[in-house]
Amino acid sequence: MEKTTGCVEYKIRLMPDEVNRFVKAATKCDFDVDIAYNSFVVDAKSIVGVFGLDFRYPLKVVCHGYDQNFDSYLKGLGNGLLSSQLQG
């Protein structure tokens, strides 16, 4: 796995029954992962925080690093990469 600094943003759709799997995948990352709807941002590694989001709308995931497995998982949940600000 290649380590990279910077941020990668994704737009995803998440259903309540997918939250456990999403949080487990996020906790495997050795960098911070945030998930947001509008101005409400929570730690993506917090199951309670993620359940507090409104799943009726697309969510933005911000990864403060890069992991190929998590990248593939997120691309399967949504519309893929929104923007990339990676430096490596």
Image: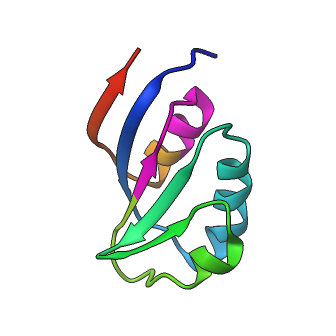
Residue appearing at x 54%, y 74% in the figure? 15
Colour approach in the figure: rainbow
Image-quadrant location for residue 85: top left
Using the image, determine if residue 39 lies above or below residue 23: below
Using the image, determine if residue 43 lies above or below residue 48: above
Residue appearing at x 56%, y 43% in the figure? 73
Magenta run includes residue 85 = no
Give the tally of numbered discs: 0
Using the image, determine if residue 78 lies above or below residue 82: below
Q: In this view, does 51 lie to the left or right of 58?
A: right
Magenta run includes residue 67 = yes
Seen from the viewer's position, the closer of residues 5 and 14 is 5
Residue appearing at x 68%, y 49% in the figure? 25
Image-quadrant location for residue 17: bottom right
Give the extent of the magenta segment.
61-73
Seen from the viewer's position, the closer of residues 28 and 5 is 5
Residue 18 percent coordinates (x, y): 63, 68
Seen from the viewer's position, the closer of residues 59 and 73 is 59
Residue appearing at x 44%, y 43% in the figure? 75
Name the quadrant of the N terminus.
top right
Q: In this view, does 40 lie to the left or right of 28?
A: left
Seen from the viewer's position, the closer of residues 78 and 85 is 85
Using the image, determine if residue 85 lies above or below residue 40: above
Residue 66 percent coordinates (x, y): 51, 30
Q: Is residue 33 left or right of residue 6?
A: right
Residue 28 percent coordinates (x, y): 73, 42
Name the quadrant of the C terminus.
top left
Q: Is residue 77 left or right of residue 60?
A: right
